Image: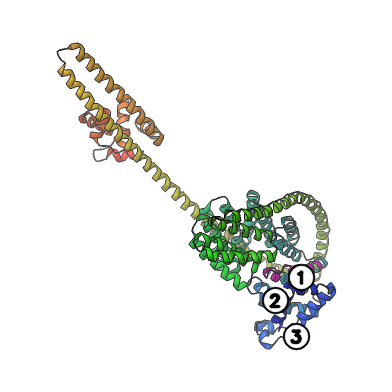
């Protein structure tokens, strides 16, 4: 019965024609109508609905403890099963109202607002959040206020209202500090970082994310760490660092799968699908986006489904399924207009234009591009205004912080007085409580240290793998350059052989003209000059290339044996390239016996025994 009332009411609010008649009801009457409908649904719920409550909750007396337990159960289903979450939270609201338990009422409205946010019913979400905010302010519940502003910021960021998103997350940080709530402090910092990334301010966004990551690692918040990995992966994707982005996406997905958070799994699958589109692996993109789509359908999250369908259409288009892509992008466009979300509409225009361009329908593609540009220009103008207002908000926040510090000072004195009074009344009870708290804190601190150690170990292992990969690439580069150098040496060898043949022919000519001493002398001078010039130039060219590749070889060699001659150093360089005695002789215009003699002197000067191989020793330098 309750589920039927909630579903019917949602349909009633979403309908445009019914909304027109519905808005004629005064606001107080509207709120009374909602409350009466919810209470009637709870009172008339059949027995099978009550069976959803765990036996231990059902057996509890109708007191504040039961209300708190119902709120916790509703909170746990908030992102994964909207109907169950609504049931538990409405039951908690009904019980809290009967008990006049204001804290229970406030938290029931807060999490009802979150449920409607996940159901894409943002007006209902704001109505519930407004009620919770008023109650939290009355109760001075700083943690509740932090949660409430975080929920507001989520809606603002989704709708592209970056100014209010930043201001609301600043409120989250403010109240989280007052409540000493590190979870919400990290959430507020993370929210500001995410908004800066949406505004394409990647450096600022990354700084906020790094700060939030430290806090979440300290408190062992696995879900929060996974969220940061996912968003950092998006930054690396925008910076075209696809390998790093994929590594972070996969790491975040593994953590979310371990936690069993299906909504977060869908977000990771969507992010990986977008990355695969950028890489050009459209089959993997379709698989990842299909996984995200199936989860969003299960969760009935229309906004997530709209975003996923938009880029699933793009992946299908690139993989040749253009007809199916057209149908899908048209559905996404209809949904985006229904949500009145300019970001979603702009994305649809972009994909439509790309499909039209691929079909050579350039007129249609141009028209769509103009619509997208017009939408982007209007959003850019809003963002400029946001930056100015953001500066003003920071100034106002600083003044507000000064006032809060003064209030904290008064509050601290008051708390000390209460503490002294409590100690004088129940000293023994307080000591017992402190001992229990100390043991728990010690256990929690130990768990955090173990977690940090494991994370540091993982990071070190990753760095070692990266270093090994870099060393492997460096070694491959050196080997490639060595091959090029050897090739150059062989080219020099061939040139020298050719020049040797020319010199031999000149020697033959000299013999033919032996009778003419003038001609014979001239030929001999040409041969000698050709030999000297070629030997000098070819070695100078080879030596220049060799030093670029093995720039420290000569230094190491002379450090081991400073007494080496220039000829011996030259032969050592050629031996490092694993050239044969015959090839070295041809390059240096020396006899093979001379090369063997030089090798023997090298081995002796380097103190190498007869069994040691000279070439491997030189190749290691």
Which of the marked residues, 3 or 1, is nearer the chain's N terminus? 3
Image coordinates of residue 258 in percent, x first then y, are 55, 68
Q: Distance of mark 2 from mark 1, alpha carbons?
A: 12 Å
x and y, in percent, of residue 221 in the image: 62, 63
Which segment did they paint magenta? 114-134
Indicate the position of residue 230 as horizontal and vertical percent values. 58, 59
Kindly indicate the quadrant of the structure image that contains residue 517.
top left
Q: Is residue 488 part of the magenta span, yes or no? A: no
Residue 173 visible within the image: yes
Q: Name the residue nearer the viewer: 389 or 121.
A: 121
Chief secondary structure of the magenta span? Answer: helix
**In the image shown, does 189 or 402 lie closer to the viewer?**
189
How is this picture coloured?
A: rainbow
Q: Residue placed at 84% from the left, 58% from the top?
A: 410
Q: CA distance from mark 3 to mark 2?
A: 15 Å
User: Quick one: SS at disc 3?
Assistant: helix
With respect to residue 333, does 507 lie above or below?
above
Circle 2 SS class? helix
Q: Which residue position is annotated with label 3?
A: 43
Compared to residue 361, the image places residue 538 above or below, namely above
What kind of element bears circle 1?
helix
| Residue that numbered label 2 is attached to | 86
Few, some or many residues within 10 Å of mark 1 (<14, 14–19, 20+): many
Could you say which quadrant of the image residue 504 lies in?
top left
Name the residue: 52% across, 63% down.
322
Q: 385 or 193, which lies in front? A: 385
The residue pinned by badge 1 equals 128
Answer with left or right where residue 312 lies relative to residue 180. left
Is there CB contact under 8 Å for labels 3 and 1? Answer: no
> As drawn, which residue projects farthest toward the bottom?
47
Q: Nearer the N terminus, badge 2 or badge 1?
A: 2
């Amino acid at each position: 019965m309750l589920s039927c009332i909630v579903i019917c009411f949602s349909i009633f609010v979403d309908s445009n024609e019914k909304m027109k008649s519905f808005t004629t009801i005064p606001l107080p009457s509207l709120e009374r109508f909602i409350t009466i409908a919810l209470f009637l649904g709870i009172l008339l719920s059949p027995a099978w609905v009550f069976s959803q409550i765990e036996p231990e909750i059902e057996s509890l007396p109708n007191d504040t403890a039961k209300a708190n337990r119902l709120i916790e159960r509703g909170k746990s289903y908030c992102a994964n099963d909207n109907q169950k979450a609504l049931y538990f939270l409405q039951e908690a609201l009904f019980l809290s109202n009967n008990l006049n338990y204001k804290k229970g009422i406030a938290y029931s409205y807060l999490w009802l607002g979150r449920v409607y946010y996940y159901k894409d019913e943002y007006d209902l979400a704001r109505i519930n959040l407004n009620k919770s905010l008023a109650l939290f302010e009355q109760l001075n519940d700083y943690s509740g206020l932090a949660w409430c502003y975080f929920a507001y910021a989520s809606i603002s960021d989704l709708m592209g209202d970056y100014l209010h998103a930043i201001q609301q997350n600043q409120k989250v940080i403010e109240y989280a500090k007052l409540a000493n709530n590190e979870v919400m402090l990290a959430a507020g910092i993370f929210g500001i970082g995410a908004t800066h990334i949406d505004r394409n301010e990647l450096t600022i966004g990354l700084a906020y994310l790094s700060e939030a990551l430290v806090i979440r690692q300290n408190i062992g918040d696995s879900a929060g760490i996974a969220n940061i990995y996912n968003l950092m992966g998006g930054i690396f994707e925008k910076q075209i660092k696809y390998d790093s982005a994929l590594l972070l996406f996969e790491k975040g997905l593994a953590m979310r799968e371990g936690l069993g958070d299906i909504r977060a799994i869908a977000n990771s699958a969507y992010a990986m699908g977008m990355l695969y589109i950028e890489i050009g692996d459209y089959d993997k993109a379709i698989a990842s986006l299909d996984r995200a789509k199936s989860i969003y359908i299960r969760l009935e999250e229309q906004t997530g489904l709209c975003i996923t369908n938009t880029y699933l259409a793009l992946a299908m288009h690139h993989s040749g399924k253009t007809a199916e892509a057209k149908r899908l992008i048209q559905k996404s466009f209809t949904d985006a207009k229904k949500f009145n979300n300019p970001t979603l509409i702009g994305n649809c225009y972009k994909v439509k234009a790309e499909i039209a361009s691929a079909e050579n329908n350039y007129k249609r593609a141009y028209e769509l591009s103009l619509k997208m540009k017009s939408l982007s220009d209007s959003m850019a103008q809003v963002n400029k205004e946001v930056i100015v207002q953001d500066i003003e908000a920071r100034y106002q926040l600083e003044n507000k912080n000064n006032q809060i510090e003064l209030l904290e000072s008064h509050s601290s004195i008051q708390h000390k007085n209460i503490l002294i009074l409590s100690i004088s009344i129940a000293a023994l009870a307080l000591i017992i409580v402190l001992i229990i708290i100390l043991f728990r804190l010690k256990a929690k601190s130990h768990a955090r240290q173990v977690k940090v150690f494991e994370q540091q170990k993982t990071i070190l292992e990753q760095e070692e793998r990266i270093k090994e990969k870099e060393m492997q690439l460096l070694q491959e580069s050196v080997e490639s350059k060595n091959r090029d150098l050897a090739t150059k040496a062989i080219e020099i060898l061939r040139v020298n052989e050719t020049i040797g043949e020319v010199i031999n022919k000149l020697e033959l000519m000299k013999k033919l003209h032996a009778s003419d001493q003038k001609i014979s002398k001239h030929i001999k001078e040409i041969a000698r000059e050709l030999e000297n010039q070629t030997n000098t130039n070819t070695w100078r060219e080879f030596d220049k290339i060799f030093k670029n590749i093995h720039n420290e070889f000569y230094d190491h060699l002379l450090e081991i044996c400073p007494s080496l001659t220039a000829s011996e150093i030259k032969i050592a360089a050629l031996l490092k390239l694993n050239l044969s005695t015959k090839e070295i002789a041809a390059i240096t215009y020396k006899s093979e016996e001379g090369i063997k003699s030089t090798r023997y002197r090298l081995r002796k000067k380097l103190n190498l025994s007869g069994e040691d191989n000279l070439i491997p020793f030189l190749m290691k330098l």
